[in-house]
Amino acid sequence: MVTVAKVMGEGDLAAAAAKIRHGKLVAFPTETVYGLGADATNDLAVAAIFDAKGRPRFNPLIVHVADQRDAASLSTWPPLAATLAAHFWPGPITMIVNRRDNNGLSLLVSAGSDTVALRMPDHPLALALLRLAGRPVAAPSANPAGRISPTMADHVAVGLGDRVDLILDGGTCPIGVESTVVDLTGSKPRLLRPGGLTRETIETAIGHALLDPQQETAKDESPLLSPGQLSSHYAPRHRVRLNAEMVAPDEGLLAFGPNPIAGATCTFNLSPKGDLREAAAHLFAMLHDLDRRDIAGIAVMPIPSAGLGEAIVDRLKRAAAER
Ligand code: TXA
Ligand code: MG
């Protein structure tokens, strides 16, 4: 059985950091979701992440760092990355930048490309683990590939079991959706994945709009796509139906706002007061709960797509996509 450890003190974190240095897999909490971490400089350890998740090798991993200096030593770190880091790190934004030659990172984290995804998480346990490990940590979300992301240690234990060496239990992740991924390798920054930091907040900080994934500029011949943004993803066992206005008696309801539709077998309300921050924090846990129920499908009420709603609607569309 996998060990799920509540962190009581520095000793527990030091033991977890030693496991990372020895090439083991350690799941840990971040402000967004739980990550499945391994030493990003160790090919075998990184390969073990792909195996544990059943993740296709063409889908690169995010490398987590303890501070901006580490990010700058691993990559060419353009001025815009420094600006975004100054505004938002530690925090839920991941930047895709060009790798520096001989930076020590496993090529597997980049799935063979010249770029690397870097992120400094805003969570005390994650930051302490990174500092004690003394090296960059590759970590995708700690769920089997294509399934719902974990926001509690229990989700990781159920999904990955003893494919993980240790799960650090830090309670529930406060933001609840993954980091926003921004590609800084082209002539203009591009939003590859909406996430916990809203598009509007980033655009205000940089003073202009972010490009969309497929949007080309005259200078970029072929925009970088995020291989992880495959359409079927976050898939619950049950069929998911979006923008429901009615619900069948054998369906479970994922509601939003003060007036949930009546008549479902069971109802989970993302935010009775209609708050998107609260809805993001509840999203994956409620999908995990609904998935355990004996129901015919999951009906989801309409959710506004502005602000954090962009990430929530993105995840729900993928959950509802044809498999
Ligand atoms: O909040 C998060 O970002 C969480 C926590 C654990 O930090 N991590 C996470 O990792 O969501 P993952 O692997 O589930 O999602 C990473 C996304 C994928 O869509 C992947 O394709 C993309 O980032 N990605 C990683 N490296 C990339 C690269 N070099 N170029 C383009 N996309 C990249
Ligand atoms: Mg993921």
Image: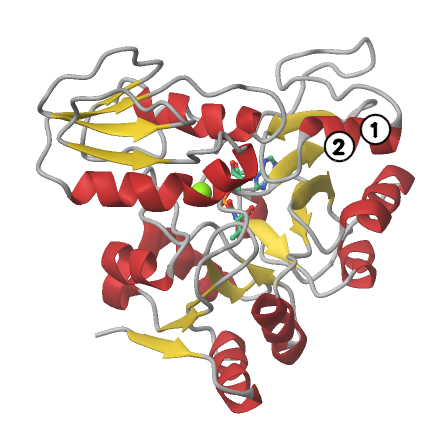
Asked whether mark 2 and ligand 1 are closer than 8 Å, the reply comes as no
Q: Position of residue 235 (x, y in %)?
A: 29, 33
The residue sitting at 78% across, 25% down in the picture is 186
Classify the position of the C terminus by image quarter: top left
Left or right of residue 159: residue 258: right
Residue beneath the point at 81% across and 8% down:
218
Give residue 319's quadrant in the image.
top left
- The residue drawn where x is 41% and y is 57% is 49
Tag 1, which secondary structure? helix
Residue 122 position, x and y percent, is 65, 58
Depth check, front residue: 238 or 35 = 238
Q: Which residue in the structure is indicated by mark 1?
A: 204
Residue at image mark 2:
201
- CA–CA distance in space, label 2 to label 1: 5 Å
Is the residue 178 above or below the residue 229 in the image?
below
In this figure, what is the number of numbered marks?
A: 2
Q: What's the residue type where badge 1 is placed?
A: Thr
User: Is 156 left or right of 310, judged from the image as shown?
Assistant: left
- Tell which quarter ligand 1 is in: top right
Amino acid found under the numbered disc labelled 2: Thr
Taking depth in this image into account, of 296 and 101 the one nearest to the observer is: 296
Q: Is residue 164 left or right of residue 112?
A: left
72 vs 29, left or right, is right
- Taking the view exactly as shown, the residue that stands out farthest to the bottom is 11
- The image's mark for residue 116 is none
Q: Nearer the viewer, residue 6 or 126?
A: 6
Q: Badges 2 and 1: C-beta atoms under 8 Å apart?
A: yes
Q: Position of residue 34 (x, y in %)?
A: 46, 56
